[in-house]
Image (tube, rainbow, N blue to C red):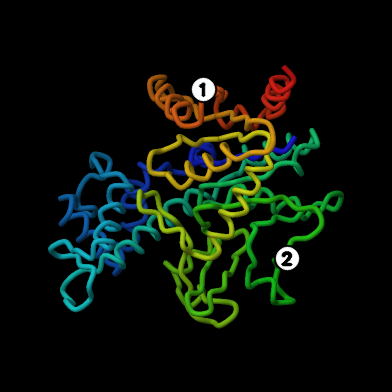
Amino acid sequence: MEICIFLGAGASAAENLPIQNELFSNYFKNSLPLHPYSKMNTNLREFFKEMFNIDVLLDDIDKVNFPTFEEVLGILDMAEQRRESFKNFRTDTYNNRSGSINILRQYLVLLTANSINNAAKVSNKYHELLLKNLMERDQLFNTTFISANYDIHIDNTISKLYDKENMPVMLDYGVDFANFNFKNSSWKRPCGKTIKLYKIHGSLNWLYCPICSSLTLTPYEGGVMRILNNQDEATCLNCNERTIPIIVPPTYFKNMSNVYLSSVWNKAEASLRKADVIIFCGYSFPEADIHIKYMLKRVQTSRNKKPLKIIVFNNHENKLMSALKKEEMRYKRFLGEDIIFTKDSFQDFAMNPYKYISLIKNNNRS
């Protein structure tokens, strides 16, 4: 059976990473006080004070009702698309007194990276458990992972398999990295036994060079943080110019034009077409992800195989049943009533994936 496991934010939250509505409070409470007057933090403080009447340095962060990440990025993206400005934040650069919307947007992406990277220095318990259990049932090499997350939990968990003498496994992101061109690189072109991981919204360990259009991988490390902490260490392997992140933030106006992201999306769609089942883990099927919905509907309506089986795990300990029911309605409204929407969590699936895979197999026979 060919399986695609789709990892959303809830899968990372299982490893104690902040979810989207915690990113602002997490950053302004824990990271900003370390460098309150850096250029980035000064500009962010001015932006939130001017636009939302929030002083991220002086206000009690625990009591602040922050706008959502989608709302903040959405208004900046719309301003850029319409070539319009806010009073003190402009899309043009001729007025030096004004903050740049483009720069603010980059700062918000780095804020996201910082919050996730700092929280990611913990165990990969459930990701490791999932791979171990899939391996024991000889299902791992028939599984493709598609991740909407930037963190590198699943990356590092797969990469660790390469060190095992009895079964060397290589991680295949579906793109070529500049690392492949250097003999002394710690990251080689995948060959032999591989596990495919397609990160459709980019990754904390991808550094893109806008000069020579190459992509550098920083194995086991969220290399995007180099851009924030020491730009001289965030240089392209090919031409030594400074790099930028490939991170597609949670907004309605997603830009998927990067050539590497386009390749990843094409390969993700190809894997979904071959799959017998998609297993959604920690993914709420948000309204803003129209690109994902478009891809799923293309796959769902143009298959030569049997109808695609879909099963969802997106519960957690403190989740209200009303919220879970709304998510179930979103899934079924768009993908059909035949999907299996469980009341279980990513942790439940990771602890016994074959229990649920067997359920799908039995449904296929009936």
Residue situated in front as seen by the camera: 337 or 126: 337
Q: Amino acid at mark 1?
A: Glu
Q: Amino acid at mark 2?
A: Arg
SS at circle 1: loop
Q: With 255 as the anchor, is 158 left or right in this view?
A: right
Q: CA distance from mark 2 to mark 1?
A: 42 Å
Disc 2 designates what residue?
Answer: 189
78 versus 356 height, above or below: below
Q: With 234 as the anchor, is 146 left or right in this view?
A: right
Tell me whether the residue at label 2 lies in contact with that at label 1, contact meaning CB atoms closer than 8 angstroms: no
Q: Total marks drawn?
A: 2
Q: Residue at x 23, y 55 (%)?
A: 57
Please tell me which of labels 2 and 1 falls first in the chain: 2
Q: Nearer the viewer, mark 2 or mark 1?
A: 1
183 versus 40 height, above or below: below
User: How far from the left and from the top, in percent, is residue 288?
Assistant: 38, 43
Query: What numbered label is drawn on residue 173?
Result: none
Q: Residue at x 74, y 61 (%)?
A: 190
Which corner quadrant of the image does residue 237 belong to? bottom right
Quarter occupied by the N terminus: top right
Q: With 66 as the anchor, is 335 left or right in this view?
A: right
Crowding at mark 1 (Cα within 10 Å: few <14, some 14-19, many 20+): few
Q: Residue at x 64, y 51 (%)?
A: 197
Query: What numbered label is drawn on residue 337?
Result: 1
SS at circle 2: loop
User: How far from the left and from the top, in percent, is residue 260?
Assistant: 55, 63
User: How far from the left and from the top, in percent, is residue 143?
Assistant: 70, 42
